[in-house]
Image (cartoon, rainbow, N blue to C red):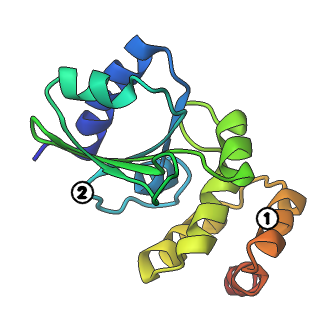
Amino acid sequence: MREPSESAASIAEVLDALGVRWTIIGALAALEYRADVRITTDADFLVEWRDDLVEALEGAGFDVEIVADAGEPPHVLYVHGKGVKADLMLPVVEYQRVALDRAGRYLAIEDVIVHKLLAWRPRDRDDVASILATDPELDEDYIEHWAHEWEVRDRWDQALRSR
C-alpha cells in the first residue's frame, strides 16, 4: 500500500486530466492544520461529479466501487488498485457544494472542522482538538452556522470548551 499522500497524487492526476474540481478532505486535510502528525491509511477527496469520472479512473487502472441510493446519482466512489486506497465523496447536499467552492487543494480549515464534527469518532475529536491547539484564525460564524444546520452544535461547544 502506498503512502496516503502518494495515493492522493495518483488520483489527483486523473482528476486534473479530466478537469474536474476536487479537494483533499479527511485526515490528509486535517494534517494541514493540526499541531502534530497522526497516521492515516487512505486518501479522501471531495470531487465534482462527471459522467466520465468512473471510466477515467478505471482507464487509469483503478478498481472503482460505486455507492448510490436507488435511482440517485453516486455519492461515494471507493477507488483501489495500484497500491492506492482512496474514497471520493461526491457533493450531493448544498453544504458539500459550498465546501468544494471554498476549498483549494485542501478543504478549508473551517470545513475540516465541520466534517470532523459530523463524524465525531475519537480520531475526529483529536483532529479538532489538535487544530484548535494551533490557535488558528477561524470564521467561527461559518462553523456555528453549519454545526447548527447539521445539529452538531453541542459537539462544537464541547470542542471549544476543551481548548
Q: Position of residue 32 (x, y in %)?
A: 51, 46
**Closer-to-camera residue (160/41):** 41
Looking at the figure, which quarter contains the C terminus?
Answer: bottom right
How dense is the environment of label 1, judged by Cα within 10 Å: few (below 14), some, or many (20 and up)? many
Residue receiving disc 1: 146
Compared across the picture, whether 7 is left or right of 159 comes to left
Image-quadrant location for residue 153? bottom right
State which tag comes first along the sequence, 1 or 2.
Answer: 2
Residue 41 numbered mark, or none? 2
Amino acid type at circle 1 is Trp
Q: Position of residue 132 (x, y in %)?
A: 66, 67
**Closer-to-camera residue (44/63):** 63
How dense is the environment of label 2, judged by Cα within 10 Å: few (below 14), some, or many (20 and up)? some
Image-quadrant location for residue 135? bottom right
Disc 1 versus disc 2: distance between alpha carbons? 28 Å
Residue located 13% across and 26% down the image: 61
Vertically, is 72 above or below 62? below
Closer to the eye: label 1 or 2: 1
Residue located 49% across and 14% down the image: 19
